[in-house]
Image: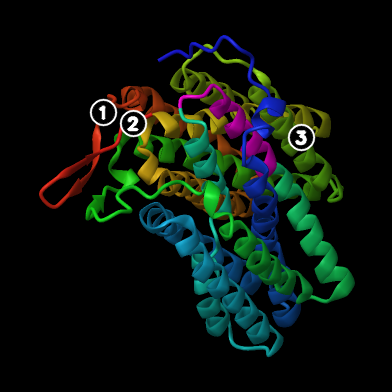
Amino acid sequence: MASTVTSRPGYGQLLRTRGAWTFLLPGFAARQPFAMLTVSIVLLVQHTTGSYGAAGAAAAVTGVSMAVFAPCTGRLADRYGQRTVLVPGVVVHALSGLTLTTLALAHAPLWALLAAAVPTGASTPQIGPMVRARWAAKLQDSPLMSTAAAFESVTDELTFVLGPLLATALCTAVDPAAGLVTEASLTLLGGLLFAAQKGTQPVVAGSGHARVEHASALRLPGVRVLIVAFLGIGSVFGGMQVSLAAFTESIGEPGLNGVLYGTFAAGNMLSGLVCGAVAWKVAPQRRLLVGYAALALTASGLWAAHSVLVLAGLGLLVGMCIAPALISGYTLVENLVPIGARTEAFTWLTGAVALGQAAAVTTAGQLEDRFWSGAGFLVPTGGTLLALATLLALRSRLAPAPRGRTVARGVGHRVPVAVD
């Protein structure tokens, strides 16, 4: 369904949306610690154990736990309200993070660290999906939805630039435990401030006297197709992280790793800003297919790059292709998913990126160790090509559902909710 937008959406118009700043500012504060978590764990555990293997294992367990439990958190938020889920969640996360810190400083055995990493990851608050769900609730049938998706993509990228820098500075200049302690504290404070904004959280379907059985977003075929696409995007992030580090190490210039990855991230942010400023007349499912084809094409050339300049140029192009795919996928959620299941849908997508990234880091590392320098770049190539093939084969599943669809069933009655 092509957009019929006649006015040009923009960030100024988006940010003038009534009530937006009441959840954007605390939301940014609450999601910042998310980008600090992995780096803080790695630096602390490596310092106390002297092992990067142990540090990587603790970080991996945290990431997998987050990816597995995030959709459950999203579904509970859709069913009972974001505030109801978020308040106990941030308390548990803060306590779990401080427990992990204490165990690491006490030189506890690895199994104890891994045990503490499970609730730390599982309770990670899903602020990004919750913010996206609030935008979707406010901007129903609005051309600004694509702008909001772009704004959130850029915000995520900015978070993942600032978070690791802050965590690294705290762990190296203050104390090895300072990163994780700060992460837990900011999560608690920011999460509670965000949860306090009750006026902007999406209305819970069937929140009155009706007894409603909420269908999972995973039951929608379009969401399952998007999950595959986002797994492929995660493979790009993970594969680039490992392979760029291995490449710069192989040429004796490890300091260039940050420059090359920063170029990749800059391309992502730049294209995200542009995508949000465009008044699109092309349906988001078509934009996703075109953007993903461009991503797969550019990622396929990474393994053949043998110079810093060529790799920097390709990295910039790959980054510029990621944002359109991400933004189109998030925009499609509004068309595919009823409002009462959108937080869960967004968490499935963010969790898919995290899972794809974790799998790519592991696979790319093995390829770099066992084969030639640059073999890890085959992971983004394979991940995006497989995801593109899935998108092309199942593209009909991305068509918007008919309006008037019943999305919740009660006892002896129906509660119809129109799909946007």
Residue position marked by numbered label 2 in the rendering: 419
Q: Residue at x 68, y 37 (%)?
A: 154
Left or right for 205, reference 246: left
- Compare marks 2 and 1 and give the one earlier in the sequence: 1
- Compare marks 3 and 1 and give the one earlier in the sequence: 3
Q: 370 or 269, which is in the foreground?
A: 269
Residue 266 disc label: 3
Residue 339 on the magenta segment: no
Q: Residue at x 59, y 49 (%)?
A: 364
Q: 97 or 195, which is in the foreground?
A: 195
Magenta stretch, main secondary structure, is helix
- Compare marks 3 and 2 and give the one earlier in the sequence: 3
SS of the residue under disc 1 = loop
Q: Residue at x 54, y 47 (%)?
A: 200
Left or right for 34, reference 73: right
Residue position marked by numbered label 1 in the rendering: 404
Q: 21 or 354, which is in the foreground?
A: 21
Q: CA distance from mark 3 to mark 1?
A: 41 Å
Residue 318 in the image, given as x and y percentages of width and height: 66, 30
* Dot 1 amino acid type: Gly
For this orientation, the residue located farthest to the left is 412
Residue 148 on the magenta segment: yes
Q: Which residues are magenta?
A: 141-156
Task: Tell me which corner region of the image, top left, top right, bottom left or bottom right, holds residue 340.
Answer: top left
